[in-house]
Amino acid sequence: MAIDKNSNGYTFGFSIVMVVVVGTLLAVASQGLKSRQDKNTADKKMMSILSAINVEADRTNAQELFTQYVIEQKVIAGKDLTAQAFDIDIKKEFRDKNLPAADRNYPLYICEKDSNIYNVIPVIGTGLWGPIWGFVALESDYRTIYGASFNHKTETPGLGAEIKNASFSDQFTGETIADTSGVFAPILIVKDGSGKGINSKVDGITGGTITSVGVEKMVNNTLEVYVKYFNTLNN
Amino acid sequence: MSEKKEALFSKKNRKLMTDPLDGSNPISVQVLGICSALAITVQVEQAFVMSLAVMAVLIFGNLIVSGMRNLIPSRIRIIVQLVIVAALVILVNELLKAFMPDVSEKLSVFVGLIITNCIIMGRLEAFALANKVWPSILDAIGNGLGYGWILVVIAFFRELFGSGKIFGLQIIPESFYEAGYMNNNMMILPPMALITVALIIWVQRSKNTDLIEEN
């Protein structure tokens, strides 16, 4: 018996079968691939942290180098000081804008490279289209930036997306985030090209103004909290 | 209809692949998929990866729709096509995230753009729904390549003049900049993509006079 393919019954039946098949397929794919995807995300995070202390890692050796260089992970402020620093998703910590700063968890990674100690601080903020984040490494004086690495989700390629390039993040090296007495000193991202050298100024990205401003806010907002914490260590 | 066994790469089938490169190019002749030609042609690398991704989705989309063409109820065929394309794109994205995380990172938001790419829906509706599987695959490859080469050419000029680089490598020497050469920031902005497309169309039409409409 031929089926009338224009009948309502056939159309309904076809839709139901299609939705079930496609839904199952996607659910299976999502669940089946999740562990691999999570591992990739974790590897990427380790690579970014290592990149802030100028250690180049790739996906094959990220885990190994991470355990080699990172000697301590801790949470410096917030509700749960015993939490595993690496497992803290700072995107979630900062998403709720109404949450008082005291209730947020601030992770800190302490790294040792060539017998120098570096403090790697995760930063997060918003660019033009979506979240931007990164890691800033401070030297053991708690005020000089040793290195930085930034990344983004959806910034415009060739414009805002340039923040992830070393040519941008290397400018932070040597800048200080606090004066010698521990008073917080913000880093400005400037348009006029005066950012060269060590002067608490960094050149922004041409055509990527909003992303550049986002980086400035992100770095300063987060580092301010850490500077307060470091001051308590110094005293 | 008398079925004659056709060679896999008969003249007609080859034409399916070569036509979209020039005479019926999806971008420069049919003016489809302009939105993504605008958005991701700032750098050659992105354009290249995007072209591959679109081609992959196009091939599998055409394959599935063509295979099911006698089952799909015509009243809901557009919805069915959308579901197929969307499912494929999500699947490709999940697979990339798991197995090729670096590529997935480069594509980031543009994966979503594939779903809305008019070329894909256009080929499913206009070709795959009425043709056998093998010609549909060839048609998909042809259109994917036709889309891809235009994208890469646009990206080549935009990256070269916009940031002095190709594939992220500095091409214009430092001495030019010292002599006063400046990157043209206009090239990075979306309007220049349209102007570049227009220039390509101009060149193409002056070479291929068949494309010029008679008034």
Image (spheres, coloured by chain):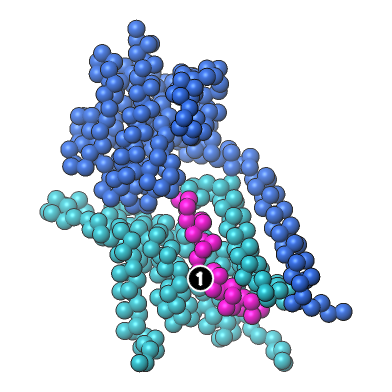
Please identify which colour was used for chain A in the image.
blue
Which chain, by letter, is cyan?
B
Was residue B113 drawn as part of the magenta stretch in this picture? Answer: yes
Q: Decide which of A150, A155 is in the foreground and name it.
A: A155
Is residue B126 shown in magenta?
Answer: yes
Q: How far across and how far down the image is residue B16, in percent?
A: 54, 80
State whether the magenta stretch is mostly helix, strand or loop: helix
Callout 1 secondary element? helix
Q: Is residue A222 above or below residue B115?
A: above
Q: Residue at x 72, y 92 (%)?
A: B2
* Residue at left offset 32%, top offset 44%: A210
Q: How many marks?
A: 1
- Residue B75 vertical position relative to residue A56 in the rendered view, above or below: below
Q: Residue furthest right?
A: A1
Question: In the image, A219: left or right of A99?
Answer: left
Where residue B190 appears, as percent x and y from the top left, is 33, 61
Chain part drawn in magenta: B106-135
Write the residue at 34% across / 83% down: B205
Label 1 Cα neighbours within 10 Å, binned few <14 / some 14-19 / many ≥20: many
On the image, numbered disc 1 is attached to which residue? B119
Task: Name the residue type under label 1.
Answer: Ile
Instruction: Give the farthest residue toward the left.
Output: B179
A145 lies left or right of A81: left
Image quadrant where one finds the N terminus of chain B = bottom right
